[in-house]
Amino acid sequence: MKNDNRRTYIVAACLLFLLLALMTAIDMALPSYHIAIKVIKKASVYALVAVSMNLLNGFTGLFSLGQAGFMLLGAYAYAIISIPVDKRAGVYQYFDGGLVQFSLPEFFSGFLGDTAGTTVGILLALLLGGIIAAIFAYLIGLPVLRLKSDYLAIATLGFAEILRALFQWKNLGPLTNGSNLLKSYPDFENATSYVILIGLFIAVIVLLVNSSYGRAFKAIRDDEVAAEAMGINLAKHKRLAFVISSFFAGIGGGMLAMYMGTLQALSFKSTMTYEILLVVVIGGIGSITGSVITSFIYIASLEWLLRGLDSGTFLGISAPGIFKNGFRMAVVSIIIMVVVLFFRKGIMGDREFSVSRMLKKMDGLRVRRKKPRASGTAGGDGAND
């Protein structure tokens, strides 16, 4: 068993290395493929947020719809403390330059150099955004986590909507810039940095799921009464899952802000939560690899492969009367319905992609193909004797 796990980790590391090498080559040699790079960035961010949501909904059994609100907190926290000081007057032009007058990346660039300082500042700003989202999750979770099922979903959804409206409030303008855009904050130059960073965060979630805490989360999901009888503190572990999920959602929100280039609270509508929930359900509730795979398939299809359905030409077929704005979403909806009908538990169900399991199945197929020949030969020899 240990050898199988070791082989799985080695193969996964090799595949990740090849993916990073491919993206680096695209970044350096094929700059015209900027659309593909954007798809990789956005899909990576959605993968992290979907996995964080799956940790709560799939592994702990808490139906929460507040993901967009926690992403909003992380995104604004990152942007506010990352905008360069000399550009704050232009960004906060209606609020006298804003309340915050420092930039975390600039602060570290002062003694670590531009490249290293900016990178360290970005990472700390993302982590700070996650921490702020986790603090809000803890405070919100104290009363809200006493609710169950649909009531919990409605309460967390209401929190996200209130937060979005609050961030557009003019009285908070010196901090959030009101309903105006936040911009000019730094971003990673290539998609490789997104994949590496988000891969590390997802790896942390995988380790958590496979730990004693993860087993406690699953026990709560399966049967709360039995879990409590086993000595699991329900309130503590529910709150812990809620806070951790919100922490990674906040980091995902900060990276989504980097991807978008400009930030406005209006972008974090409830439809964003529904979109992430859709990825979780199609990938498989309780499957981390299902969420990651579906994120890349969904974003690639929506933002790249099916884009021609809105522009008039698709797969070499020109039909401006049919292929126009809105048709792409209709096709995506039909595809989702078909997937849900034929994959009731999602693409992966509650299983994880395993290289060792795949290799064992391939070995089993080879053995089955060899068995008829062996039996036939044996029977022939016996007849001749």
Image (cartoon, helix red, strand yellow):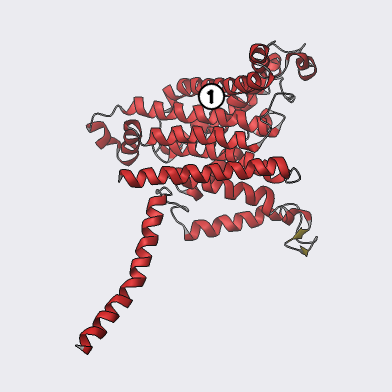
Residue lying furthest left: 385
Work out whether residue 381 or residue 94 is closer to the camera in this orientation and state it: 381
Left or right placement of residue 85 versus residue 70 in this view:
right
Q: Amino acid at mark 1?
A: Gly
Describe residue 95's horizontal placement relative to residue 123 as left or right: right
Q: Quadrant of residue 3?
A: top left
Circle 1 sits on which residue?
130
- Label 1 SS: helix
The residue lying toward the viewer, choosing from 258 and 194, is: 194
Q: Is residue 312 left or right of residue 56?
A: right
Q: Residue at x 44, y 29 (%)?
A: 242
Residue 299, percent across and down?
62, 46
Asked if residue 153 is positioned above or below residue 176 in the image, the reply reads below
168 is higher (above) or lower (below) than 106: below
Residue 67, by quadrant, is top right
| Residue 108 image point, x, y percent | 63, 14
The percent position of residue 228, horizontal first and vertical second, equals 26, 31
- In the displayed structure, 313 sits above or below 302; it is below
Q: Nearer the viewer, residue 210 or 369?
A: 369
Task: Check the image and name the residue furthest to the bottom.
Answer: 384
Res 285 seen here? no
